[in-house]
Image: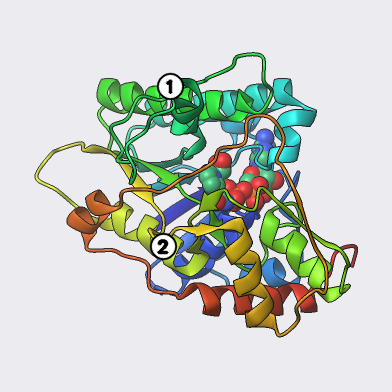
Amino acid sequence: MKILITGGAGFIGYHLAKHLVSNTENSLVLIDNLQRGKMDEDLKILLANSRVQFIQADLTDPEFYKDMPIDFDHVYHLAAVNGTKLFYQMPQEVLRINTLSLIYILEWIRCLEKKPKLCFTSSNEAYAGALEAFNQLPLPTPEAVPLVISDMYNPRWSYAGTKLIGEQFVIFYARAYNFSAVIVRPHNFYGPRAGYDHVLPEWSQKIMNQTEPFIIFSPDETRTFCYITDAVEAMQLLMDSSTTHAHPIETVHIGNTDEITMFDLANKMFVAVGWTPKKLEFESSPQGSVKRRLPDISKIKNLVGWQPKTKLEDGLKKTFEWYTKHPKHQ
Ligand SMILES: NC(=O)c1ccc[n+]([C@@H]2O[C@H](COP(=O)([O-])OP(=O)(O)OC[C@H]3O[C@@H](n4cnc5c(N)ncnc54)[C@H](O)[C@@H]3O)[C@@H](O)[C@H]2O)c1
């Protein structure tokens, strides 16, 4: 199969590519502007495989699409500005880049004679505002809940806005121009090579430096964590599945259902890596942080029989091991 992954140098893109290339019938093209993804050793090893091609390009540049390779069976559109700090720092760029790159990808597909199946990575952020706005959200949360931007003036929700409108673009382009699409909503994927801005990479760094006091933000907020190899397998299974519909469009939650507070997560991590700080301090999260998230994953179970396999302890250990070998600023 010929597969395109945009954002292929990023966290999910890299692991997805590694997973897909293990099938010797697949050949891959990865596109990334390296705004966040890095041309590091891991990616270079992946690119040493002759079935993986890398193109460095900015997907918000309309000129690029004139030379874009065609003839793909599957397109995973992952490229986006991601990372909570960036939502606060440059919400206008988050909106521009995420929306423009998706529109250009959809327009490019629209003009292709042979239309590939599209996977679009939305986010749980797209519905998270419902809890803040109405103080109610079914937990576990199924796919068919309203998507809500609870505060248009809070930059936090810029990213969620791009996912909300992004889902609609995908649904109505796929319907109008007859191609299949899967909209996935990742729920906190974690693992090696996830950059340095998420909570687990930050904690890994602090544990390596034996930082005291060890600060935990929002200790009573809960999250679920899905290990990256499980997550990319879920995406692949959804893309490879076929139904009787000519051009199915599905929105699917991918995540783990084992809920854990940030406090318990920190303690689990200390046990997994064999170091516990003497002093813990607690702080609250910035405005817009969401207290609780728990995906309902019964839809993906029914569709493709997937459920997460990796135990949190094992995933935390593997993640920490990678970060000890790849500390920040190397
Ligand atoms: N990691 C998660 O748990 C999670 C959760 C919810 C949603 N998502 C979504 O999944 C997708 C992948 O997430 P990730 O964690 O791998 O993020 P990431 O930041 O590691 O990867 C995104 C990649 O897109 C690239 N990119 C950004 N703008 C680009 C542009 N204009 N042209 C070309 N490439 C560009 C970046 O350089 C980066 O390598 C994103 O759409 C993200 O919103 C991820």
Q: Is residue 282 left or right of residue 232?
A: right
Q: Is residue 281 left or right of residue 10?
A: right
- The residue shown at (64%, 71%) is 267
Q: Can you give x and y, in whole percent of width and height, for residue 108 in the image?
A: 47, 29
- Residue situated in front as seen by the camera: 35 or 63: 35
Q: Can you give x and y, in whole percent of width and height, for residue 42 in the image?
A: 69, 71
Residue type highlighted by circle 1: Phe
- Residue situated in front as seen by the camera: 182 or 110: 182
Residue type highlighted by circle 2: Asp
Q: Is label 2 in a helix, a strand or a loop?
A: loop
Q: Is residue 186 left or right of residue 315?
A: left
**Location of residue 87 by image quarter:** top right
Contact, mark 1 vs mark 2 (Cβ under 8 Å): no
Q: Which mark is residue 134?
A: 1
- The residue shown at (69%, 81%) is 273
Label 2: which residue? 258
Q: Can you give x and y, in whole percent of width and height, for residue 107 in the image?
A: 46, 24
